[in-house]
Image (spheres, rainbow, N blue to C red):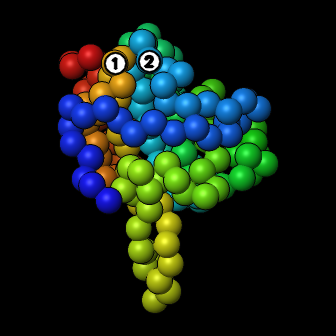
């Protein structure tokens, strides 16, 4: 798989979304997109990250920016996550991990001595024309959403 290059067109995808529709990245042309991949609904780090995006949601909205969260969880699990934490943005179900693979975030992971494939927490900023502006890989949750917000305020 090729490395993504800043400035190139972001890989398009089509996935089922938590609003009951199927969405594609190209549906959001004309808006900036925060595309964040996370390992699993309801886990501590993923919950913190989702709630941080929730708490800054209106600021991103004021900057013409859409937030899309992606994991390999089912829509049913996404709905529980959204309901429990009042998430105001779409979560996409990448159950076959095509989008995760196209962004290079489907990785071999190790946890408690077990190896398995899973999503490496990563965030991509895509501009109004659909070009990749910034990527963060192996994201540390603390302060990450503020960093993403600042990048959009300053650059887009």
Q: Is residue 140 visible?
A: no
| x 42%, y 32%: residue | 34
- Name the secondary structure under disc 2: loop
Q: Is residue 110 left or right of residue 16?
A: left
Image position of 105 with respect to 130: above or below: below
Position of the N terminus, as image quadrant, is bottom left
- What is the number of the mark on residue 57? none
Q: Is residue 109 left or right of residue 13?
A: left
Q: Farthest residue in the bottom direction? A: 113
How far from the left and from the top, in percent, is residue 154? Answer: 21, 18
Q: Is residue 150 left or right of residue 122?
A: left
The answer to whether mark 2 and mark 1 are in CB contact below 8 A is yes
**Dot 2 crowding, Cα within 10 Å, few <14, some 14–19, many 20+:** some
How far from the left and from the top, in percent, is residue 44? Answer: 55, 58
The Cα atoms of the two marked residues, 2 and 1, are separated by 6 Å
| x 26%, y 47%: residue | 4
Q: Nearer the viewer, residue 85 or 60?
A: 60
State how many labels appear: 2
Q: Farthest residue in the front direction? A: 1
How far from the left and from the top, in percent, is residue 45? Answer: 50, 56
| x 61%, y 30%: residue | 23
Image position of 26 with respect to 156: above or below: below
- What is the number of the mark on residue 29? 2
| x 41%, y 51%: residue | 102
How far from the left and from the top, in percent, is residue 142? Answer: 36, 48
Q: Can you tell which quarter of the image residue 79 is in? A: top right
Q: Can you tell which quarter of the image residue 72 is in? A: bottom right
- What is the number of the mark on residue 129? 1
Q: Nearer the viewer, residue 13 or 136?
A: 13
**Dot 1 crowding, Cα within 10 Å, few <14, some 14–19, many 20+:** some
């Amino acid at each position: 798989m090729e490395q993504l290059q800043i400035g190139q067109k972001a890989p398009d995808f089509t996935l089922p979304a938590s609003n009951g529709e199927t969405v594609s990245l190209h549906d959001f042309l004309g808006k900036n997109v925060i595309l964040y991949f996370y390992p699993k609904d309801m886990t501590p780090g993923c919950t913190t990250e989702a709630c941080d995006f929730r708490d800054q949601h209106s600021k991103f909205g004021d900057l013409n920016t859409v937030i899309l969260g992606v994991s390999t969880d089912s829509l049913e699990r996404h709905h529980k996550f959204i309901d429990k934490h009042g998430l105001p943005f779409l979560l996409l179900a990448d159950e076959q991990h095509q989008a995760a693979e196209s962004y290079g975030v489907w990785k071999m992971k190790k946890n408690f001595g077990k190896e398995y494939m899973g999503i490496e927490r990563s965030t991509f900023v895509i501009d109004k024309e659909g070009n990749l502006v910034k990527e963060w890989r192996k994201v540390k949750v603390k302060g990450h959403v503020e960093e993403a917000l600042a990048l959009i305020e300053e650059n887009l």
